[in-house]
Image: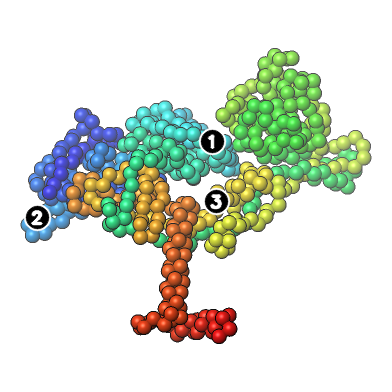
Amino acid sequence: MSVALKVAATKDHALKVPDGDDQIAMLHSALEDSIYISWEVNNTYQAYFTAWDDESVAYQMLTVQNMVEIDGQWFVIKQCEPDYSNGIGTTAVTLQHISGEISRMHIYGSDPVDWGQYSHTGNSNVSLDVPDSTDTVAQSVSPGDILNAFFGGDNGKNWNITYQVIGSFNNAMVENPYAAGSGKDAISRILEAWSSAVFWPDNLNLRIYSHDEFYKDYGHRYDYLRDTSEVQLQYDTTDMSNAARLVGATQEIQTTSDTGLPNGSLTASGGAQAVIADAKKYLGVPYVYGGGRPVGTANPYNGMDCSSFVSRVYYDFGINIPAYTVSMESYGHEISRDQVQTGDMGFYGSKGASYHVCMALDNSTMIYEPAPGQSCKTQSISSFAPSWWERNDDMAKVVASGSSSDNGTASTADSKEQYYFAPFYFVDETSRQRWGLFVGDDITSDTITDKEQMKAYAESQFKANPDFTLQLTVDPGKEIIEGDMVRLEIRPADYVTKVDLVGYQKYPYSHTQPSTVVLNSNAQNVLDYQSSQAKKLNAAFEKLSQESQDKINAALNKKPETIMITQKEANEIGQYVDKQRQDSGG
């Protein structure tokens, strides 16, 4: 039997859901039993079918990069394998869901590109100057921030892409979240940063779900031998890990040392560089209104605002100034714009009512905490010029520590990198006691400064239980839904559990082909199955014990029927009889 499918060709193979402006033809020669969709959550979304040559326009359109609609979704043809045998021509077709085509788009961010004659939203007025290389910087972002950077505005319009975030997500620290890359890279960054997130596209509507929003109980069940002919269960401990060395964030600790040089001589290094290095270590720390207080006690990496950031840098050099802009004004004296140097404070607003502050790295560059939703960053002073500048004399002395001094011996400011807490070994004891010790690679974080938080992070990275695969063969016509949370019952194993459907190979048009379903493997599934196995084992022991007792009773009662027992059981019976005689005095 064959089924009718839409085949479409868009102009220049544009990425879009085909519509009335495109060439569309109906294919009537696709074999219904050959059409299947293969899906694995956050990984595979493909389709396959075979059609015979009915000399139709649609059959001739089965070429790469044309599209076919299957089960309400559009798939792009990636491979075609024509075959001619016994006078009949057929073509086997492999397709990828249309959302996979986002790997064709590329966003360059701030990277320089001269677009020339090609229409693009980027700036073609680029310089020949090579931009300064920047270190990897972690920023506090949400999934929506990354989606918007890649698919928002004209980027999404040019590629006919829309997107949604469904469910609640906390911000996470992501390294270079907006770095240049493909649309596929953007989705991968989200799935890596939020491990429980689910990517589920509806054609070119890209959707990021939280786990609880994606998986719902629709009342479906799979019962072995009722609508499920085969259930395969498999343990695999290959990739397990439940122990590792944990390495957290580091900080720059400022030090001073006597150079031994007399007054007026140059020290070994300048203080300005130490101030710059200290300020830059906070790059990427999120803006948190009221965060970082009290300065010197609160963890600055949990977030700071503009004034607590500047106050914190000063504190790192033993200089105490308030963490409030208006109060900070009295801790400096005004200087002109052309006098600005490292460590000077730039105020915004009117004097006595300032509302924002930054700190100069040099005469042309400043560093500051910008606003909610952003993170500590540097930019040119001219691009966001303060209303006026002030200099704190104590900070000016630190900056000038590399030049001559008035009396005594010269000293130099330096810094050393130090862990917030010493790297330590950590074990998930529950997993170790159940399965044994599986030591994995170091688990590291550039942002975690608290030891207990590091333990919690490590537990989320461990693979504390074996992979536990549940693969079912289900009857034709059984409804299969992405995001389904199903009830599974295997009566011979005394096993009942609730599981997420995480993959399938389904035949949406076939009345004879059974589908294959893959259910999730989490710790609770493993424990549920272990519990059922323990019950079976206990029942087996109880049965064995009862059978042995029956044989002993039969021997004591001298039943005439033949009793089949093992040598071990005979010995046990003999010992039991002797004990009974001794107890009875006989």
Name the kind of residue labelled 3 in the image: Gln
**Depth-wise, is mark 2 or mark 1 nearer the camera?**
1
| Amino acid beneath label 1 | Asn
Please, which residue is most extreme toward the front here? 585
Q: Quadrant of the C terminus?
A: bottom right
Q: Please, is residue 552 above or below residue 325 in the view?
A: below
Q: Is residue 223 visible from the viewing direction of this image?
A: yes
| Residue furthest left as drawn | 87
Q: Is residue 296 left or right of residue 574?
A: right
Name the amino acid type tagged 2: Ile
Do residues under tags 3 and 2 come within 8 Å of each other at their CB atoms? no
Q: For residue 461, which numbered disc appears in the image?
A: 3
Q: Is residue 274 above or below residue 357?
A: below
Q: Position of residue 490 (x, y in %)?
A: 36, 56
Of callouts 1 and 3, the N-terminal one: 1
Which sits earlier in the primary sequence, circle 3 or circle 2?
2
Element under disc 3: helix
Q: Residue at x 71, y 15 (%)?
A: 353
Q: Which residue is mark 2?
A: 88
Q: Which of pointers 2 and 1 lies earlier in the amino acid sequence?
A: 2
Neighbour tally class for label 1: few under 14, some 14-19, many 20 plus, Cα within 10 Å: few
Please rate how many residues cluster around mark 2, counting C-alpha atoms within 10 Å: few if below 14, some from 14 to 19, many from 20.
few
Residue highlighted by disc 1: 170
Q: Residue 315 versus residue 580: which sits nearer the camera?
A: 580
Residue pictured at 23% horizontal, 47% vertical: 477
**Structural distance between the alpha carbons of marks 2 and 1:** 58 Å
As drawn, is 524 to the left or to the right of 256?
Answer: left
- The disc label shown at residue 258, or none: none
| Quarter of the figure with residue 187 | top left
